Image (spheres, grey):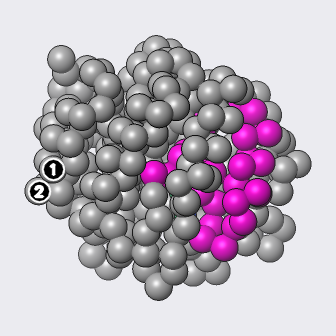
Amino acid sequence: MTTGTLITVAPTGAESAKAEVPALPVTLDELVLTAKACEALGAAVIHVHIRDDEAEPTLDPGRLRETVTALRESTDLIVQLSSGGAVTDPEAARLAVLDAGPDMASCTMGTLNFGDDVFLNRWEFIVDLHTRMQERGIVPEYEIFDLGHLTALQRLLGKYGLPHGGHVHVDFVMGVPGGMPGTTAALVAAHQALRDLPAGTTFSATGIGRSTIPVMLAALSAGGHLRVGMEDTVTYAKGRPVESNMQLVARAVGFAQLAQRPPLTTAEARQLLGL
Ligand code: KMH
Ligand code: ZN
């Protein structure tokens, strides 16, 4: 059944430097303003990475709690904290993200080369994240950077049970150097592999860099949902830097409307995700 489109904004990430991408929201004020504007445009979920006073990525527990509180006070967005952090973050700090009490947290389903770095996600770490989220009533978004990550998810759910709320939602993060490419063919392969997951599993997709548009179009036509934002895309079109996260959300909303799958409200999104 075709539904409306769940739109997630990933406004900051851990990879771009503020000095090189001045429009990147890095302070709490910038993040809250971005969140409010993206919600007004049609976003329902915000995938959050935060920065310190020097605009460097941080998993500082106090800042994370303050961020969750501020986003809840100012918006009705579903607050999804990144447990991925930066490639340099230790496992303990990534697990401690859950202490900030978000609605959702990401859970990456395997290790991969990440450009010149390695994004380490050991099996035991994944199990820890999954089971701690079950215990605390936090809904995971399983991040799928490669096809094998879906097999790992099937194994995880088979051994440790469904996530809190009972609904499984995955996000295909496509086009990372080291992961699956951001192509229609790869999206179709990933979509087909969802057959091995529980009935009703939903997916979002995002394409890094220039793969953002092909992935968005393929996801919409396959019944999927969309993640956009400056975590993944800092160039709007050839030679045109992204001006703001709102520009990317507005484009995604436009595509979703053209596909006759308009953005889900935050209430509809909570229902879809089992929140
Ligand atoms: N920054 C990447 C190393 C996530 O948020 O869970 C990991 C990432 C995935 O962005
Ligand atoms: Zn992220």
State the CA–CA distance, disc 1 to disc 2: 6 Å
Q: Foreground residue, 34 or 113?
A: 113
- Residue 91 drawn at (x, y percent): 70, 60
Q: Residue at x 69, y 43 (%)?
A: 32
Q: Which residue is mark 1?
A: 189
| Residue 268 visible from this viewpoint | yes
Q: Foreground residue, 79 or 36?
A: 79
Q: Looking at the image, is 3 positioned above or below residue 219?
A: above
Horizontal arrangement in the rendering, residue 24 relative to residue 6 (left or right) = right
Q: Residue at x 47, y 33 (%)?
A: 159
**Crowding near pointer 1: few (<14 within 10 Å), some, many (20+)?**
few
Q: Which residue is mark 2?
A: 185
* Region in magenta: 80-109
Are circles 1 and 2 on residues that touch, CB within 8 Å?
yes
For marks 1 and 2, give the one nearer the viewer. 1
> Mark 2 is on which residue type?
Ala
In the structure shown, which secondary structural element does the residue marked by tag 2 occupy? helix
**Crowding near pointer 2: few (<14 within 10 Å), some, many (20+)?**
few
Horizontal arrangement in the rendering, residue 204 relative to residue 230 (left or right) = left
Name, please, the residue furthest toward the front: 159
Q: Looking at the image, is 150 positioned above or below residue 208?
A: above
Q: Residue at x 75, y 33 (%)?
A: 101
Horizontal arrangement in the rendering, residue 85 relative to residue 98 (left or right) = left
In the structure shown, which secondary structural element does the residue marked by tag 1 occupy? helix
Say which mark, if any, is on residue 139: none
